[in-house]
Amino acid sequence: MTETIEFQAEARQLLQLMIHSIYSDKDVFLRELISNASDALDKLRMESYRDKDLGVDTSDLHVELRTDSAARTITIADNGIGMSRDDVVTLIGTIAKSGTAETLAKLREAQASGSEEVTAELIGQFGIGFYSSFMVADRVEMTTRRAGTDGGVHWESAGEGTYELSEVADAPQGTSITVHLKAEDAEDNLHDYADPAVVKRIVKRYSDFITWPILLNPTADGAVVEGAEEEDSEQEASNEPINSRKALWARPRSEVSDEEYAEFYRHVSHDWQEPLETMRFTGEGTFEYQALLFLPAHAPMDLYYRDAKRGVQLYVKRVFVMEDCEALVPEYLRFVKGVVDAQDLSLNVSREILQQDRQIQLIRKRLVKRVLQTITALRGEDAEKYDTFWRECGRALKEGLLSDQDNTQAILEASSFASTHDPEKLTTLADYVARMPEGQESIYYVTGESRAAVENSPHIEAFRAKGYEVLLLTDQVDEVWVGMVPSYGAGDDAKPFASIAQGDVDLADDAEKPEGFDDLLSWMTTTLADDVSEVRLSTRLTTSPACLVGEVGGLPPQLEQMMRSMGQEIPVQKRALELNPKHPLVENLKAAHEARPEDAGVAETASLLHDMALLAEGGELKEPSAFVGKLAQRLAATL
């Protein structure tokens, strides 16, 4: 006896919205049905362990895919737990338990506004993976029998207003779903899903690592399917699974070779080289996941492209969900490639958009922690590998100092820096602190465009003479993060960062401080008022006559210049001009001012001194031609 049951009005409209609007890729209907079949096999195995009297054979659990090009159908069958009539009515016949017009109105509103987050929140409550088949089907049939029972159920619907239920006495255990396909439509992105080649491609992409074997057009003797052409090897039914079932992250490490890891890395990263380092993590407890991640041996070509794709592949129970899952990897770790396979995640109905829930954030947090630990450990275990990584991807890693406050110290631990200690090797901050002489309280640094430029900076002269090590920071990101990270270390052991080009540094003994310069400093401050905030004596200079020094916390000149080149309006920042009282030029300028305070040539020399300090740090002159003219006159006067 066949019973026709009508959908509720709201549920009928809701079904149409789901069929035509939710999924962006029609291929996923097969992924959803295979995933449902895999879940049914998992449930049967668990039920057989729990109920020893169930009386089922679990020795040959599998999923079958049967295509019929003439009838234009594809059938997805499993010999899993199956469903009773009540199960079918509850799980398949009812789309939304509430069935209210209010829910439908919210979904329509979210869809009209284009809000993916709201839409995901609403549709995430419906288990409608089965209904994705109506994207490609005119009609869907399902025959199912629950394990341990005698009678089966047949369900059929065109996805419009009603569905039919009838009893089947001789139904096999499990569930068989036959999809009667629509005509191919290139504009609607519909392929010929009755073509075994198309089916194999979809399985390879989405369901290759499903635990259970997936058989395509199996026969009892493995013969070629009737009607298949000899050259069409895709229709040959050898009864061999078309899915590899080789999820490397789920196999013991001892059973996976380096060659297999390298090949998998090439597959997920599209890189032709072998990975620099392989990382395997397992999360257990309230939520479970497995991760197989890789560090590259060279920077990806698009590492610094603004719109480059990033993230790792996301699987849920070995089912492919997303190619580039940005939610699991922060932008500064965009060079990391690999796979994360979660057991249970909050996904929307199409499994295409992750909701930002606690599980996602916790997995991300653990992955970031383990990746940073691996990079730090690599330095001690294989210095050559670490040097390669830092050379290729270190600049990207330091971007995390701008955005990830929770892991600032871990990123600093994983980082290396050039310094005045060794011109050939980089140093860690831990080693820097260990070498600090007694009395030094800060970690000194200087920023600039190149190592050669900062090593010859006038600011560094007295620090080198006093034996103070200085970090040489030459990446653009360094200009920014040093202003956002106050110190290295924790608690009482924290050491603040201090720019040698900012603030009033006192490196001289009281006996060394000269006197009698007050008049010169006051006069020069007035004369150069348009360019400097003040003129003062310096203790950081030993060979250069002068240097420009910014205020603590102010914008470094390189960053200021970079922001202006990007079109940002930055207020003019005057800096202090520091003079080296022991330099002959400064001594002669002092004497000349005392002897001829109104001489225009003395003021011209003071202006030249400022411009020389600006050039020495790599700055740009306001009027280069005026500087050249004044310099030529001064040189001519000396000959």
Image (tube, rainbow, N blue to C red):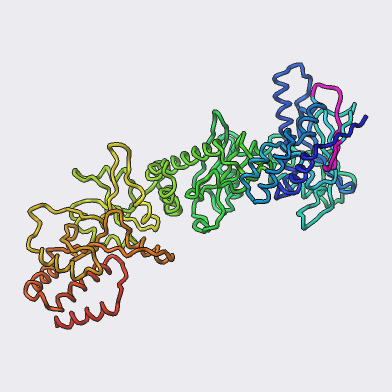
Q: Is residue 449 visible?
A: no
Q: Position of residue 110 (x, y in %)?
A: 66, 47
Q: Is residue 141 left or right of residue 272?
A: right
Apparent side of residue 296 relative to residue 247 in the rendered image (left or right): left
Q: Residue at x 15, y 78 (%)?
A: 601
> Where's the N terminus, which quadrant?
top right
**Quadrant housing residue 158:** top right
Furthest residue in direction front, as rendered: 102
The answer to whether one can see residue 368 in this image is yes
Q: Is residue 148 magenta?
A: yes
Report which quarter residue 172 is drawn in.
Answer: top right
Quarter of the figure with the C terminus: bottom left
Q: Is residue 479 magenta?
A: no
Return the residue nearer the eye: 369 or 225.
369
Quadrant assignment, res 218:
top right
630 left or right of 405? left
In the rendered image, the residue lying farthest to the top is 53
Q: Residue at x 19, y 82 (%)?
A: 633
Give above or below for 410 relative to 594: above
Residue 13 percent coordinates (x, y): 78, 43
* Residue projecting furthest to the right: 1
Where is residue 144? Give x, y as percent. 83, 30
Name which residue lies at 49% across and 54% down: 298
Give the answer, above or below, for where 286 lies relative to 238. above
Q: Magenta residues?
A: 147-163
Could you say where residue 497 lies in the image, as x and y percent from the top left? 29, 48
Above-or-below relation of 367 to 552: above
Is 516 in front, or is 327? 516
